[in-house]
Image (tube, rainbow, N blue to C red):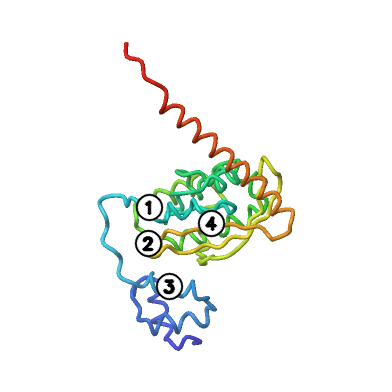
């Protein structure tokens, strides 16, 4: 009644007998359901015709320019996350802050399946809810993606928390927020972050963390940055030594 559609038509929508309602109907439904902008956009994508199934798994790559940009964040943990929540690129400070930010790791598995995930996130409940919501945003309406179904199936089978949160069907585009880390080197550290969508790379986001100026968190982050820089210098020296060592032919 509030949406201005008949009971019969709304029943057909709920039963899946009308899978592609018009934009006018979607907006009419969104108002009484009190959906925010991100949820409305997700609703629109769900109503679009299903994409053709792919025979191969989509491979995500990071543009060289974006990789170079990460290197400029000397005092800010920064990383690029893909649509399946894989860590595609990260600067040394991000990895030192949270081992779950290591390239090749998956954020979802780190949060829900890795015991260290619960230890390093002091606000784990918030992080878990956010992770599930942003996963839905990242994949959009492509819920038949084989890579996604495998990931969701694995997480649902192995994590009661993920299964419960995924079943809530919540979606939210989180661009700013905060996380509290229990870092093994500096202890508890609270950081704000901003996530930016990377144009031309569907589903990829750049996340950059910062500390409140003048806070103890900033002091801790400065210490971590010095450690990360020192580690990079050592790696460079060792790599140079290996290259300069003459090989011996037997």
Q: Secondary structure at mark 4?
A: helix
In this view, the residue in front, 184 or 134, is 184
Q: CA distance from mark 1 to mark 2?
A: 16 Å
Q: Pointer 1: residues within 10 angstroms few (<14), some, or many (20+)?
A: few
In this view, the residue in front, 207 or 233, is 233
Above or below, comparing residue 86 to residue 135 in the picture: above
Q: Nearer the viewer, mark 1 or mark 2?
A: 1
Residue designated by label 1? 64
Residue at 42%, 23% in the rendered image: 245
Q: Nearer the viewer, mark 3 or mark 2?
A: 2
Q: CA distance from mark 1 to mark 3?
A: 34 Å
User: Which of the labelled discs sits on residue 202, or is there none?
Assistant: 2
* Residue 166 place in picture, x, y as percent: 51, 58
Q: Secondary structure at mark 3?
A: helix
Residue designated by label 4? 131
Q: CA distance from mark 4 to mark 2?
A: 18 Å
Residue designated by label 3? 43
Q: Secondary structure at mark 2?
A: loop
- Residue 6 lies left or right of residue 195; in this view the side is left
């Amino acid at each position: 009644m509030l949406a201005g559609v008949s009971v019969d038509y709304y029943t057909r929508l709920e039963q899946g007998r009308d899978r592609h309602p018009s934009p006018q109907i979607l907006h009419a439904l969104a108002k009484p359901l009190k959906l925010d902008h991100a949820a409305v956009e997700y609703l629109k994508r769900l109503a679009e015709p299903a994409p053709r199934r792919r025979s191969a798994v989509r491979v995500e790559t990071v543009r060289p320019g974006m990789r170079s940009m990460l290197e400029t964040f000397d005092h800010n943990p920064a990383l690029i996350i893909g649509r399946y929540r894989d860590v595609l690129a990260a600067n040394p400070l991000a990895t030192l802050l949270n081992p779950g930010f290591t390239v090749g790791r998956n954020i979802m598995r780190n949060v829900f399946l890795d015991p260290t995930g619960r230890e390093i996130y002091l606000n784990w409940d918030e992080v878990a809810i956010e992770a599930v919501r942003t996963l839905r945003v990242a994949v959009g309406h492509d819920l038949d993606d084989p890579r996604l179904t495998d990931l969701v199936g694995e997480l649902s089978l192995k994590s009661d928390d993920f299964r419960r949160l995924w079943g809530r069907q919540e979606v939210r585009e989180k661009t700013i927020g905060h996380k509290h880390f229990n870092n093994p080197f500096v202890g508890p550290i609270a950081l704000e972050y901003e996530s930016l969508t990377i144009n031309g790379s569907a589903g990829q986001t750049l996340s950059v963390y910062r500390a409140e100026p003048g806070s103890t968190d900033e002091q801790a982050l400065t210490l971590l940055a010095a450690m990360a820089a020192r580690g990079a210098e050592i790696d460079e020296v060792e790599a140079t030594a290996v290259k300069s060592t003459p090989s011996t032919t037997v």
